[in-house]
Amino acid sequence: MKNIARIAALLLALVLTLTTASAALADGYRTLDEIRDSGKIVIGLFSDKKPFGYVDENGEYQGYDVYLARRLAEDLGVALEIVSLDAPNRIEYLQSYKVDVVLANFTYTEDRAQQVDFALPYMKVALGVVSPDAALITEPEQLNGKTLIVSKGTTAETFFEANYQEVNLLKFDSYTEAYIALIDGRGDALSTDNTEVLAWAIENPGFTVGIESLGSLDTINPAVTKGNETLLNWINEEIVRLGRENFFHADYEATLRETYGPNADADSLVVEGGVVE
Amino acid sequence: MQDSGISILFKGVNFQRLLGGLWVTMRIALITIALSAVLGLVFGLVMLSRRRAPRAICRAWLEIVRFMPQLVLLYLVYFGFARLFGWDLDGETSAVIVFTFWGTAEMGDLVRGAVSSIPLHQRESAAALGLTPLQASRYVLIPQTVRRLLPQAINLSTRIIKTTALVKMINVTEVLKVGQQIIGQFYRLREAPFWVYLTIFILYFLICWPISALAGWLEKRWA
């Protein structure tokens, strides 16, 4: 008992010291001027999510997000320092000031917007529907009375349950199983994020994405630490400027075209100047 | 050319990067093991001391590292210190700090266990034979302690090497992270994870197996 009391007292003392020290020393995010003066901007990117942010076989960062990161650094006149991060700790990197900006295919959500500040979008994601060429589905209404394959827990499942009750849903636990079911003809079409089905259809001749953009749009936006207004404003202005030169279409051609193929419509993914139609 | 099977590992500089990642893993592990060995010895001796306060501190330290997952400690040092104190430590430094904090306590406990496992009559018999306390330590007690300690300390080393896989979560590009980046290059290739993880398994095995075998051999020899 005595020992436990001692340990508890010790821990308490430790916590108290830490909190007191923290008040005095807490740092903060870097403003636009501080970034310019330091000569480098630190941007958090994915390093294993092709084609958005990945390290290629030569050890170089590539992808749609990376293309934008390089341009931001260039236009600020500073060097780019890349921090490779994983999806679950993207917010943590901003809140602990380890990075200035996160460009890791960060989808805007209300919940995240409470914790970080999102700039204008530069990409959008909606649902896509892929079906065999022989019986191509080009309108969601064509699915009434037919079977649509979805994965459990995805936006596609929720969307069709809420809006198209006459469509029979065939649900699978994993994407892999769902795609195999489509190839085996166990359903008339398959729906998931349009980026996914577009890339899949390229790999699987005989299947086409008849509906490229359906349902409520999610947008992908740059994010900065909450309250970092100077940097946020600069990024927003920059995205508008870049929109005038159709920068994000050029980004798409350079980084995504190969994945989505010659027939895919860039406008189903790209957002120019922060304006979502 | 179609990318397939094991060839993805040798595309471009992929394999060199994998080995580079392995070196990062080993660098963190080796520094940690060296620091833990030295500090752990001190830690163990403090745990054996008659003074209560230092012993209680060590006890608390040991309990903390035992019930805190290493990942939490890594986040605390890497993100937490930056947030709380503005100490912007890089990932590798954070990793060495956390693993040494852990390794020191574990090593200390091994030292304590090994020393106190030597029966009192060994010291008394040595004295009865006319050995001075220093001679008794040198010729009777320390050799026995080291024999009990070494195999366990070596096992702790392999645990430290394996645990370094966690540092990929704090922006350290070690062997596992490089592996995931390679899988990312071939994300449409279903067998890519198999080949990459198999290779990483073999790399870890090549490093840990000889160390572990050494511990087993020593244990048998000194049993």
Image: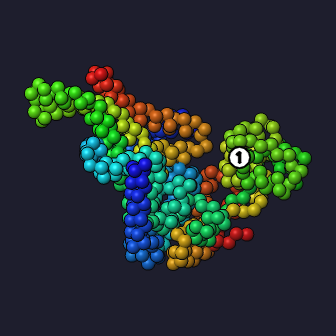
Q: Residue A223 lies in what quarter of the image?
A: bottom right
- Tag 1, which secondary structure? helix
Left or right: residue A141 versus residue A60 is: right
Where the C terminus of chain A falls, by quadrant? Answer: bottom right
Left or right: residue A212 versus residue B36 is: right
Which one is nearer the viewer's eye here, B76 or A171? B76
- One can see residue B130 in this view: yes
Q: Residues within 10 Å of mark 1 (few under 14, many from 20)?
A: some
Q: Residue at x 15, y 27 (%)?
A: B126
The spot of residue B3 in percent (x, y) is 55, 38
Mark 1, residue position = A201
Q: Residue at x 75, y 44 (%)?
A: A207
Left or right: residue A104 versus residue B96 is: right
Q: Chain of mark 1?
A: A
The spot of residue A126 in percent (x, y) is 72, 58
Residue type at tag 1: Ala
Which one is nearer the viewer's eye here, A138 or B174? B174
The spot of residue B60 in percent (x, y) is 38, 50
Which one is nearer the viewer's eye here, B212 or B222? B222
Number of residue marks:
1
